[in-house]
Amino acid sequence: MTDVMWNTWADTYQARPRRTTAPGSTEEVVSAVAEAAAEGLRVRMVGTGHSFTDVAITDGLLLSPTSLTGLRSVDPVAGTATVAAGTPLCDFNDALAEHGLALANMGDIAVQTVSGAVQTGTHGTGRDAGGLASQVVGMELVLADGSVVECSAEHEPDLFHAARVGLGAFGVVTALTFAVRPAFLLRAHEEPMPLDEVLERLPELRADNDHFEFFWFPHTGNTNTKRNNVSEGPARPLSPFKAWLDDDFLSNRLFERVNRVCRRFPATVPTVNQISSRALSARSYTDVSHKVFASVREVRFVEMEYAIPVEHTADVLREARSIVDRGEHRVSFPVEVRFSPADDVWLSTAHGRESAYVAVHMYQGTPYRDYFADLEALFTSVGGRPHWGKLHTRDRSYLERVHPRLGDALAVRDRVDPHRRFGNAYLDRVFG
């Protein structure tokens, strides 16, 4: 297929590749890579476009994952499940549930492909359970020479450690094997809390909950906290009406309309945020894990997120509040703060250090560059690592200072893709 435009979910980047194809098997990926090499085209596999950067953009061959889907195998005894790379996370969750299994942790949306989510370092929040890549125990990749490699911590370990969060730079991921656990329930408790109290109690809130996060409303001193803990049950999900009211009408439909007003009349943002944050009330419910972890987000936005050393969280949030209070920015979207244990994935934003993730958003179509630049300067002042799939301005000279295994990963890349068959402009910036 030729002359097809592809764009990211937030319309931050568009691609017009020379050709697009949707391989349905590993063998078809091998053929597509070989044909691209013969034509001198670079190759990128896209996902659902939920990255805000141009990490997936190509002017060569664009591989669509829509036919590379499905659960390949499950081993309940070993606690593993292998899934095709293009499978949406929501479908993977449903397939695991049919076998009485679940992922230990996941992010707050589930429409991405498993490969796209893992390759860009998607994460949730957790005291003990880390991001998606830390749950991957095996990978199948098609390399630039057309060979198919299965790698793990025991077989081709350097490739495995480099390519788990690999940005598609090491090969086309065709399947992933995850460590999974028996299906479980989560009890969710959401509660408004003053920002100063959250920051003061942060060590306790993180230590006492399996999964803790909070949303701070800029121009206010208010937050909404979320505590998710493993529960023996019984399940007590939200009623259909309550779920529709809170998670559809208020969080999507009404929030969309409010942001349209704020985009047109920026001076209203502080008042709107005060009203919105004070209108929140506590709620609790118990449901299957993936239904608690993930929610539907239909309001379009742009986002920047940095992983900072967890010990800097309170100071960074206080300074972020000071930046907003100076009055130069009008921010209608809450700032999301999540946490992750250290992991051993070479290019993970949580590699080797316990991390706090601070995500800042702006409604689509609202000027964001100055706000993001001010916050990025704050995040980088404490050695923050940018999320690979979210907007940032960092290049290799910065990234090699905060990612101690970047050089090792790039040595692997030199070995498996010396001619940069899987390169693009984004990788040229971040990897040099």
Image (cartoon, grey):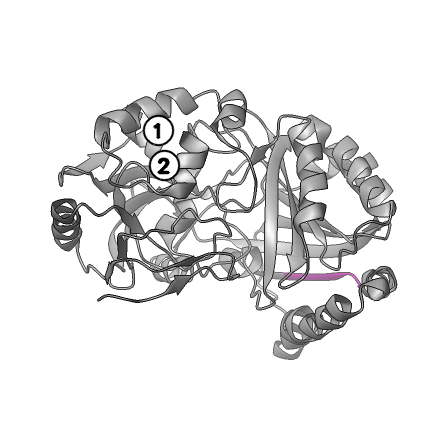
Which label was assigned to residue 164?
A: 2
- Cα gap from disc 2 to disc 1, whole angstroms: 6 Å
Residue occupying the point 73% across, 67% down: 263
Identify which residue, 167 or 153, lies in the foreground: 167
Quadrant of the image containing the N terminus:
bottom left
Residue occupying the point 42% across, 24% down: 406
Identify which residue, 361 or 198, lies in the foreground: 361
Residue occupying the point 71% across, 72% down: 260
Quadrant of the image containing the C terminus:
top left
Residue on which disc 1 sits: 161
Horizontal and vertical percent position of residue 266: 80, 63
User: Quick check: 326 left or right of 361?
Assistant: right
Horizontal and vertical percent position of residue 58: 33, 51
Q: Secondary structure at mark 2?
A: loop
Horizontal and vertical percent position of residue 176: 30, 45
Evaluate if marks 2 and 1 touch, with contact meaning CB atoms under 8 Å apart.
yes
Magenta-colored span: 279-285
Horizontal and vertical percent position of residue 68: 25, 58
Near mark 1 (Cα within 10 A), the count class, few <14, some 14-19 or many ≥20, is: many
